[in-house]
Amino acid sequence: MKAALEPIAVFSDFDGTVTTKDTTVLLLELFGNPAWLDIEERMLAGEISEAEGMSAEFALINTSWEEAIGAILNEIHLDSTFPGFIAWLGEAGVPITILSGGVEEISRGLLKKHGIEELEVYANRLHVENNRWTLIPSDRPKIKGLCNHCKTFSVLESQQAGYRTVYIGDGFTDRCPAGKADIIFAKDDLAAYCELNSIEFHCFRDFTDIRIQLERLISHIRFDKKITGKDA
């Protein structure tokens, strides 16, 4: 006897996953103080929390919003396979949510440039006054309070609602949600972290890789416009 079909929810990091380069790193390289590198090392080493580290790094940026977003839109691009991936998910009736450790205004600006305006995006916000930058933590609920944006909350929220979760990421802020998701796609630093901590994951280079692997991994899931689920 078949069990009730189980819906799928996909979550993806933004910087370095959807984009070709991390937007925060670009801003710090162009408009920040070199002291951000020391903050980054302390954060990665666990000496300070992500909430402390990212806030301190953004405070080092000294430029106008107009100059910053201009540089980002000029120098950073989306993975060319991402639009096709989200179109495929849309046809399948599978929701995808962007979970970013960066800034919502920046993420939405880049997506809009590429004609993508309907995606759900959860991220931090930004306040810029007299060229001084302040990171405003996401207003999404936080589990431990160690991150400005608790990505893990969204993953667990979907699981509690009955979804099988897929997480896609590449870096530091993806570690916690990757440890909770049902299916993980990882590259770069996140892949190394998963391997070190014996977390099962699937490698990827781009979103075409992910689509191919998802079709194989969940071939028993019906991808169509009416319903997505799995047979028991």
Image (cartoon, rainbow, N blue to C red):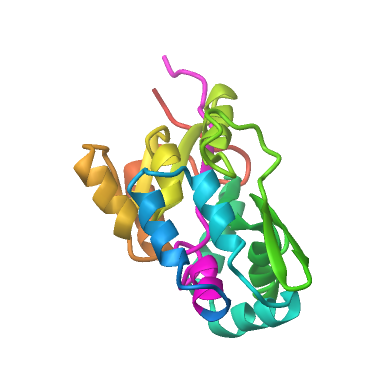
Coordinates of residue 6 in the picture (x, y in percent): 51, 28
Magenta part of the protein: which range?
1-29
Place of residue 87 in the rendered image (x, y in percent of width and height, measured from the top left)? 58, 61
Q: Is residue 181 above or below residue 123?
A: above
Q: Residue at x 55, y 83 (%)?
A: 75
Could one spot residue 132 in this view of the protein?
yes
Judge by depth and name the residue closer to the eye, 190 or 46: 46
Identified at 56% across, 22% down, the residue is 160
Q: Looking at the rendering, which quadrant does residue 231 occupy?
A: top left
The quadrant of the image that shows the C terminus is top left
Q: Position of residue 115 (x, y in %)?
A: 69, 72
Residue 104 % position (x, y): 67, 58
**Outermost top residue:** 1
18 inside magenta stretch = yes
Q: Position of 75 compared to 209: left or right?
A: right
Q: Is residue 13 above or below residue 68?
A: above
Compared with 196, 3 (above or below) is: above
Specify whether 77 is left or right of 109: left
